[in-house]
Amino acid sequence: MRISRRHFLGTASVAVMTPAIIGRAMAATGGKALPIPDVLDLRGGGGPVALDAMAARSKIIEGRETVTVGYGQGFLGPVIRVNRGETARLNLGNRINEPVTVHWHGMHIDGNQDGGPHSPIANGEVMEAALDIDQPATTLWYHSHIHQRTATHVWFGLAGMLIVDDPDAAASELPSDYGKDDIPLVVQDRIFDNSGQMLYAPQGPTRMMGYRGSEILVNGAIRPQATVPPAMVRLRVLNGSNARIFHFGFEDGRQFYQVASDGGLLPTPMPMNTLTLAPAERAEIVVDFSDGAAARLLSAPDNNTMMGSMGGGMMGMMRGAVPEPVGDGGVFEVMTFAVDQTRSGGVTALSKTLAGAPVPAFGEPVRRRQFSLDMMPRGMGMRGMMGGGHGMAINGASMDMGVINEKMRLGEAEIWQVSTREMAHPFHVHGCSFQVLSLNGQKVDFGRMGMKDVVLVNGTAELLVQVDRKADADHPFMYHCHILEHEDLGMMGQFTVA
């Protein structure tokens, strides 16, 4: 059933359809070569460099063209590289028919540089951006952040990866040959109709739980194959999905090492067999392919719903679209890796410690704040929410662009206690990286988690937060759930720093 037709993609148009809530809208063929994003290199100064939001027809489904949007290209954006200690300059343009922003997710910059919902770029306009880079080397990302339209914009492609390099830091001795043994992976889920168009129409349970897709894309390709050398390979993994939580692991059970999280390198490589990433979280992992064996990266299903313990049809409705399983328990394929023995890799072993890893430098906390992530505030029952009400909230208040919810003092450390009831939520704070002190009363080992800007909260979390960048009432920072449908429905607040 067709419910609307929008023309926010310039001369192109998108038919927003009602997808099947359970199952797959279209079975697509995977296995193409993994696309390696172009690099927009802003290191060394100069500029400004143009980066426009634009519409295109992209070849994602074999034999079809899909209407998409992207930054500087048809779908997603280039990998932007910047240097610590420099100012990165861009001219941000907009060639689609509604306002967009460019939010620099995870970057430590002032509120007027942050690209949040108070910095819209109208159709035909150009905004000058000057980003003062001062944080440890890390993997970040950027995406549109228009109030009540963020989920739609990211779904259709307004997002990309950003890498901060620190030329003055000691060498970490990690793989660093971009596209060869240092590979960006933007992992997302999408739904396509039989004509190859992306479907986005959250309603009922999929509005309440967050919108999930049946097809897995990596760098814009469906379940692709990467060719790697027989050596250590660094994978920079971004969960760029609207709502899906991934539980990554290799089909053969091979061990890998996490070497970085949202805010930069970990002190030491952490061995693991599975990695959970909620929406907007990043992790850098190193995988040893020296045995020459092909490998398939899988994920367990995302059962994060208000009725996670229920089975049958109700559980399926809450989960939304489900990728085709390839193993027991609903495990599905993300991508595959083939080893080319003719290629050489620069790293064959990892150091026991990682040079350049950030060390927490917080002051003594001077206050405590509490944040309750509310899916059904007082007066708004499930029927109202599933019917389309804008009723999600934090501390009982839905996002209001004209209201400053919290005021922080520059450089003062605070403890933020974040709580959830109905389901788990990835909680994000703009303008800083924080330390997770505890989850559900259990102390968190900093060495395993590192510095974060998103944390998946399923119960309670204690965060040590200190913001060293200013934000005034005209350009405040945000804190919000990064299930984008929840953010758009009001699970977001604003804070200033002075």
Image (tube, rainbow, N blue to C red):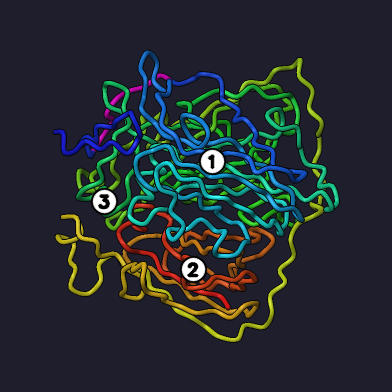
Give left or right: position of 346 versus 488.
right
> Which residue sits at x=49%, y=19%?
31
Is residue 25 in sight in this rendering? yes
Q: Looking at the rendered structure, which numbered label has been put on residue 207?
A: 3
> Which residue sits at x=51%, y=30%?
73
Residue 246 lies, in percent from the top left, at: 47, 44
Q: Looking at the rendered structure, which numbered label has been put on residue 476?
A: 2
Discs 1/2, front:
2
Q: Over which residues does the magenta segment extend?
A: 22-29
Secondary structure state at the residue bearing disc 3: helix
Pick the front one: 462 or 349 = 462
Pick the front one: 141 or 384 = 141
Tell me: residue 137, above or below residue 178.
below
Q: CA distance from mark 3 to mark 2?
A: 27 Å
> Which residue sits at x=68%, y=36%?
287
| Main secondary-structure element of the magenta-colored stretch | loop
Give left or right: position of 471 versus 457.
right
Amino acid type of the residue that numbered disc 1 sits on in the rendered structure: Gly
* Disc 3 packing (10 Å; few <14; some 14–19; many ≥20): many
> Which residue sits at x=68%, y=54%?
264
The residue to which callout 1 is attached is 160
Amino acid type of the residue that numbered disc 3 sits on in the rendered structure: Arg
Quick check: marks 1 and 2 in contact, CB under 8 Å?
Answer: no
Amino acid type of the residue that numbered disc 2 sits on in the rendered structure: Pro
Q: CA distance from mark 1 to mark 2?
A: 23 Å
Give left or right: position of 142 versus 157.
right
Secondary structure state at the residue bearing disc 1: strand
* Disc 2 packing (10 Å; few <14; some 14–19; many ≥20): many
Figure quadrant of the C terminus: bottom right
Secondary structure state at the residue bearing disc 2: loop
Instruction: Please report whichever mark, 1 or 2, sits nearer to the chain's N-terminal start.
Output: 1
Q: Residue furthest bottom?
A: 366
